[in-house]
Amino acid sequence: MDRIRALLFDHRRPLAAAFAALAVLTGLQSLQPDDPGSAVVVAAHDLDSGHLVTPGDLTTVSMPTKTQPSHLLDRAAAEGRRIAGPVRAGEPLTDRRVIDPRDLSGYGSDAALTMVRLDDPAALAGLRVGDQVDVVATVVDATTDTQVVAAGATIALVPARDDTSNDTGVIGVITDQASALDLAAAALEARLSVLIRS
């Protein structure tokens, strides 16, 4: 027993170093994630609302599966669609972060895309894809009647800032079927404008 104690005492420093190294190794192994993650398409840089997504706007990163949002888009699904609201660099792109007027599945079975000609084209400067608006119809006659004909519509299309060909203020809004019919009727006899919701 004395011999063993002497041996341990003589080699106490190497043994202490070995145990310390073993403890560090065990700690590092415990920190390794159980979920290796998978590739996710994210914004390569900040993207403005209404921006048309191009290949250069996207990059791929590895993200743990547990932290990934649902309904992620791959490159093919994201390219060519418009950003519904400002997106920060590194943010994953999902079906709710973009708008495709050809695909209204995320807005319910009763959704309809309606083109609206605004009375004042200058109002386009304040509109962005993804904005929630109320479309207001104003009939200018002896009483000048004003009423909301489509409440809570979503802006899906706005002319590009450098599109000088669209000087009539035509935008695309997503509403339900009933509101779409009301908009079509109002456009025949009233001036249309929009109120942006906060």
Image: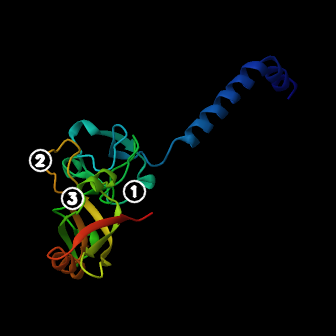
The residue labelled by disc 3 is 100
Marks 2, 3: nearer the viewer: 2
Residue 47 appears in the picture as rendered: yes
Please tell me whether mark 1 sits on a helix, a strand or a loop.
Answer: loop
Three-letter code, disc 3? Asp
Which residue is more in the foreground, 72 or 175?
Answer: 175
Q: How far apart in space, not on screen, are marks 2 and 3 (Cα)?
A: 22 Å
Please tell me whether mark 2 sits on a helix, a strand or a loop.
Answer: loop
View extreme (front): residue:
142
- The tag earlier along the polypeptide, 2 or 3, is 3
Mark 1 and mark 2 residues within 8 Å of each other at the beta carbon:
no
Q: How far apart in space, not on screen, are marks 1 and 2 (Cα)?
A: 39 Å
The residue labelled by disc 1 is 69
Three-letter code, disc 1? Pro
Which residue is more in the foreground, 40 or 171?
Answer: 171
The residue labelled by disc 2 is 165
Could you tell whether 186 is left or right of 132 in the image? Answer: left
Which residue is more in the foreground, 112 or 195?
Answer: 195
Q: Which residue is drawn at 36% across and 40% down?
A: 61
Residue 73 appears in the picture as rendered: no
* CA neighbours of label 1 inside 10 A, class few (<14), some (14 to 19), many (20+): few
Taking 152 as reference, is 75 above or below it? Answer: above
| Residue 3 image offset from top left, x and y in percent | 84, 22
| Residue 47 image offset from top left, x and y in percent | 34, 43
Three-letter code, disc 2? Ser
Q: Which image quarter holds the C terminus?
A: bottom left
* CA neighbours of label 3 inside 10 A, class few (<14), some (14 to 19), many (20+): some
Q: How far apart in space, not on screen, are marks 3 and 1 (Cα)?
A: 20 Å
Please tell me whether mark 3 sits on a helix, a strand or a loop.
Answer: loop
- The tag earlier along the polypeptide, 3 or 1, is 1
View extreme (top): residue:
10
Marks 1, 2: nearer the viewer: 2
